[in-house]
Image: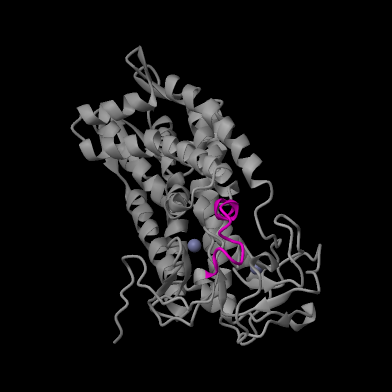
Amino acid sequence: MHHRDTPQPNLRVVEGVHECPTCGLFQRVPSLEPGLTAACPRCGGKLERRRRTSAILAPLGFCVASLALYWALLLSPLLVLDVHGRRNAVNLISGPIELIHQGFGEIGILVGFTTVVMPGVVLALMLAILGGSFRAQVPLWIRPCMAWYERLRPWSMVEVYVIGLIVAYTKLVDMAVVTLEPGAFLLGGLMLMMAVMDSTFDASIIWRHQSVDKRHGLGLYPSDVHPLPHPEKMLSCHACHLVFVAEDAVAAEHDMGDCPRCGQILRRRKRNSFSATIAFLIASLSCYVPANLFPVMSLTKLGHSGPHTIIGGVIELWQSKLYFLSLLVLFASITVPVLKIVSLNVMLYYQRHPRRWILPWLSKLYRIVVFIGRWSMIDVFMISILVAVVRFPFFARVMAETGVIFFAAVVILTIFAADLYDPREMWDAAGLNDDHASSFSRDEKVEPLSGSDEMEPKRA
Ligand SMILES: [Zn+2]
Ligand SMILES: [Zn+2]
């Protein structure tokens, strides 16, 4: 798209090599059989995954189905609340609009962004990628689309919204007659379709067909040279994972121009990750106390107004004998933010006081923290549904309260903190990314491992 910087001419592409995203180990990965995942032998990070099917047709089918469900969902009510014959319907868009009406514009925008805008954007990008890759001459704009798809995918929170809807539904059942409308089932269908689309889509196939353009003048590093160059000369693109080698050692945060394959900025390490992570952790910690102290919403029923805090909502679910849901919300809203803040602090501490034995555990913890971050949005989504549907003047009314701003701030700030942190720097600090100390596994061939539960390493 943009050509702000051309890559440094002294970069060469190293094929068949991957950098572990959580520990920074460069390693040769043999070409994988379909259905296999290659994992880092040092920390277990995922290096490469081959889907069982290499066809474009399957994810394309699920993508088109998802888009159809998405359009239908925009027009359909999710649920209807009936209070003494007065009916109120809520759809995907009414929550954000009601939040804006109540003066919580930033929360309304956040909910609209993650549940209305982003699912549409992500599906449109996927349609463009899959449609474009059908052409004989695969167009160049597929590359930025791929980079943006990976970056934006976590911000499409349909699956989290589904849980928010379930929690809202159970709260409403106590209050009045509530019926699920077609939109609720379309939403569940969309969640499943998008999950299947992602699990059949093999990004490495698209990248493999995108050989680096000759125009960029990048040479290839010979694939049969052992050992690999010094790790400080090597870097990988954070978006498309292409690995490069420079003539000389590259400073950790030096801007090496744009990736010739996907156009994202090339750096060996994330910029200012230590201080940026601390800044976001302090900000999220200072929001954490008011988020749990102040009510996040209030319910006015027949003139009586009651504030609801996050923990109050958990207790209420428990008292309604919805134990599983109660524990789920307790985990997502209270445990996860604490876990994220404490874990990242521990990582920062061990980056300053390196201990080698703990690093594989911290790398695993980092991957967990990144994975679970978005699930804390359950309560925010639940509130957005309740404010939109419980709107019966003089009888029952749910209003958002100040606490929800602090709560959403904790969720978003901790997501950013985890994003800004570079877990490879813990391994750097322990001296494990110097050539000598880590040479134990650098040039061993990585054996394909069976990866997550959906993979079976069996061969037909
Ligand atoms: Zn690793
Ligand atoms: Zn790239």
Q: Quadrant of the N terminus?
A: bottom right
Residue 75: in sight, yes or no? no
Q: If the picture is divided into quarters, which one holds ligand 2?
A: bottom right
Furthest residue to the top? 303
Q: From the top left corner, tell me how far across and down residue 290 is, in percent.
A: 49, 22
The answer to whether residue 140 is above or below residue 330 is below
* Picture residue at 55% right of the left edge, 71% below the top: 18
Q: From the top left corner, tell me how far across and down residue 397 is, in percent.
A: 39, 22
Left or right, residue 341 beside residue 230: left
Q: Residue 136's quadrant in the figure?
A: bottom right
Depth check, front residue: 394 or 130: 130
Q: Quadrant of the C terminus?
A: bottom left
Depth check, front residue: 245 or 358: 358
- The answer to if 99 sits in the magenta stretch is no
Depth check, front residue: 71 or 111: 111
Residue range in magenta is 424-439
Q: From the top left corner, tell me how far across and down residue 443 is, in percent.
A: 53, 76
Furthest residue to the front? 436
- The answer to if 433 sits in the magenta stretch is yes
* Picture residue at 40% right of the left edge, 24% below the top: 398
Q: Residue 255's quadrant in the figure?
A: bottom right
Depth check, front residue: 96 or 419: 419
Q: Residue 360's quadrant in the figure?
A: bottom left
